[in-house]
Amino acid sequence: MIYICKIELDDIAPSIWRQFQFHPEVTFHQLHKIIQVMMGWEDYHLYKFHIGGQVIGLPNPTFEDMETREVLNARREIVIKHLQKENTEFSYIYDFGDNWRHTIKLEKIDTSASAVISPICLGGERSCPQEDVGGVWGYQHMMEVLSTPNDPEQKEFKEWLREGYDPETFHCDEVNDKLRQRKTKLIPKSLLPQAEDKKPLKLTKTSLNKYLKRMSQEQMMELVKECYGASKDMERFLAVKILGEEAVESLFHEYRKKVEHEFFPQRGHGKLKLQEAKKAISEFEKLTGSEKYSFELKLFYVEMGVSFTLTYGDIDERFYESMESMYADVIRTVNFDDTAELFDEYEERISAIVSDTNGIGWGFHDTLSYMYDQIRWI
């Protein structure tokens, strides 16, 4: 059995739509992933479905006051449980800031299909708007600016738009290529082939040493060159090893922007994917081994969190716990430094975090104040 649906972005003309098919036993979270690929979104933001009087999404304390109804977990709810009749319509809302609303209609239930069916795009028209453009109004304003010769905002929009963006084009084949690449994540887990249990193969240091000892200088050089081209992380790692402090400083600014982007992107609202920001700090630490710059990234993370809550008001317990945990790491690092040089250099910023949080809820200020008082150099 397969479902054939049509999805259309509301309040946009000419219409932006897709027709697609998928297996009805996928979860709503998998359907969300399918829609993201189909429409051309980048999966930066939260989402929810409204269907049959139910709200289905990923429960999030930050936005719980937006719904008076219980939010069912999209990772657990199966589509066929809630959607069983042809011509049923339901809503998909993506990005609660820009508030992109989509209408989905179940056009046909094909019971003749017996094989496992991966999602397929059957057709569509026009590109979806670019992320963080400002919702329907922002998109319409951008389109008006781009179509108006010599508009003073035109240059800014053209620089901001991703390369090759054309609002009038849609390439079904490209979408299907992406769906095929993600196939195993977009069909019901129960229908995935069960892999045999095998022990993961791991290259040990002993094996690596034996292999390297057998290599000639030319072979070693080729290996290093191949490693350089293998991934961005390897390229950065080699840059640190070869170029030294200059590369470390350059990487610091790169990763600092990554952290800042999760709180205050150049356009739109912060995604607040704290895990991504912390991942950036961890990656930098592993790549460079720089204690000072890693310390500064952690301090910057907390500063960004404080700026975010001062800008947008109280957030949630998870957010403040993350800030407190990182601040505790900052204090530990300061106390482990027997020279007190870190404290001397960063004392003003460390104390400003405490003073700036006065009046913020969730006991945030009190917790930070207590941690600050544990600094051995005070």
Image: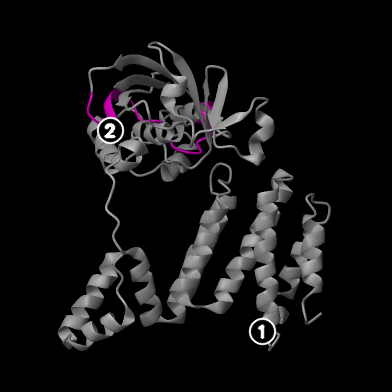
Q: Give the range drawn in magenta.
A: 114-138
Report crowding for label 2: few under 14, some 14 to 19, many 20 or more residues within 10 A (C-alpha).
some
**Can residue 186 be seen here?**
no
Residue 327 magenta-highlighted: no
Amino acid type shown at disc 2: Ser
Q: What residue is shown at x 81% (from left), y 67% (from top)?
A: 370
Q: What residue is shown at x 73% (from left), y 69% (from top)?
A: 350
Return the residue at label 2. 118
Q: Where is residue 177 in the image (x, y as percent from the top left)?
A: 24, 39
**Quadrant hosting residue 118:** top left
Element carrying mark 1: loop
**Quadrant hosting residue 55:** top right
Quadrant in which the N terminus appears: top left
Judged left or right of residue 170, residue 11 is right
Return the residue at label 1. 337
**Can residue 151 be seen here?**
yes
